[in-house]
Amino acid sequence: MEFSAFDPLDATEQWLKQGRAVALGTVIATWGSAPRQPGSVIAVREDGAFAGSVSGGCVEGAVIEAAEASLRDGKHRRLEFGVADEQAWSVGLVCGGHIEILVEPVNLALVQALNELRRQQKCAVRAVDPAGGETRLIDPLTDRSPLGLAAAAAARADKSGMAEAEGRQWFLAVFNPPVDLAVVGAVHIAQALAAMAPRLGFRLRVIDPRQAFATAQRFPGVTLVLSYPDEAFASAPLGPRSALVTLSHDAKIDDPALLAGLSSPAFYIGALGSRRTHAARLERLGAKGAAEEALARIHGPVGLAIGAKSPEEIALSILAQLVERLRLPEGRS
């Protein structure tokens, strides 16, 4: 996996390998309309160069100054900005929000280990004690300690934040692998998804045994799998970070994909087609052994009901529903 040129942790690793000193500023809490979420990171080099962001630009200057001071004395700092705070007005946080940022020097070993897990597309959680400055890198899949269990809960929720463990308050920064968007059917809507999904950070694979559809000319730079979906998912299974979208309109292709999706922990399953088409689809899948409760997982017709007509609009509605399911797993707000 390659990181973006603007990835702050990648920049941190490169700078540390060059012998430069680096401090990280991490958003650990927000209230109100603060522009960035907990876990957002800025990397600051000792000469003031930086990568990443912890706000809409309104507190970066103050955080960079604190990072430079942290690199001089080796101590971590906890900064708070809010509209009731005179310091906040001086840095421009006037939108009604409150933000808390932890600034700390970092070492190469920890950043390399974290980035290696990210390159392997494995989940990792960086636990930081904001009071004492201790940092741990946790594998939430194997660590069964109280802190490891708290990290696993944060990873499942895909949400960085504060948690109590071992009698202390920890900030848990979650680094989940990208969403695995498996699109079955190399049709026009899939081409629109291929253009949009990477901008959301999703990893896309298009699955279609029809070689005339799944071509590099139609899908430049996209991972193409020229096999039936059940075969594709046998070698690269759907996981908790997977979303499945079937678009082929061919039951021989879509139905095996949906059955594989229903037997997987995929967080989202969507199928293209009208309500009548979807009703017939549910009957077929039920006859093949899919339980009614499982069939209720399928979003059909796929996408939010925004009146979408063109392939691009339909792709937008699909991605919007996928994000809704990812961020609001208990239902629409």
Image: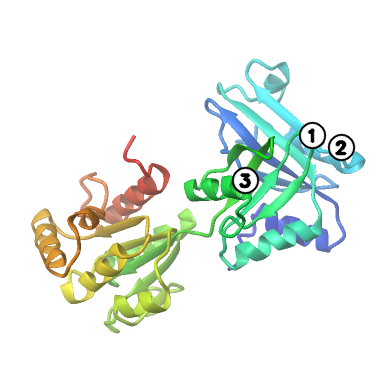
Q: Residue furthest right?
A: 73
Q: CA distance from mark 2 to mark 1?
A: 9 Å
Label 2: few (<14), some or many (≥20) within 10 Å? some
Q: CA distance from mark 3 to mark 1?
A: 26 Å
Q: Please name the residue that numbered disc 1 is placed on.
A: 77
Helix, strand or loop for disc 3: helix
Q: 172 or 43, which is in the foreground?
A: 172
Q: Earlier in the sequence, mark 3 or mark 1?
A: 1
Please determine whether, in this image, residue 114 is positioned above or below residue 87: below
- Colouring used for the render: rainbow
Q: 192 or 32, which is in the foreground?
A: 32
The circle on residue 69 is 2
Q: Earlier in the sequence, mark 3 or mark 2?
A: 2
- Mark 2 or mark 1, which is nearer to you? 1
Q: Please name the residue that numbered disc 3 is placed on.
A: 146
Please determine whether, in this image, residue 156 is positioned above or below residue 114: above
Label 1: few (<14), some or many (≥20) within 10 Å? some
Q: Is disc 2 in contact with disc 1, using a CB cutoff of under 8 Å?
A: yes
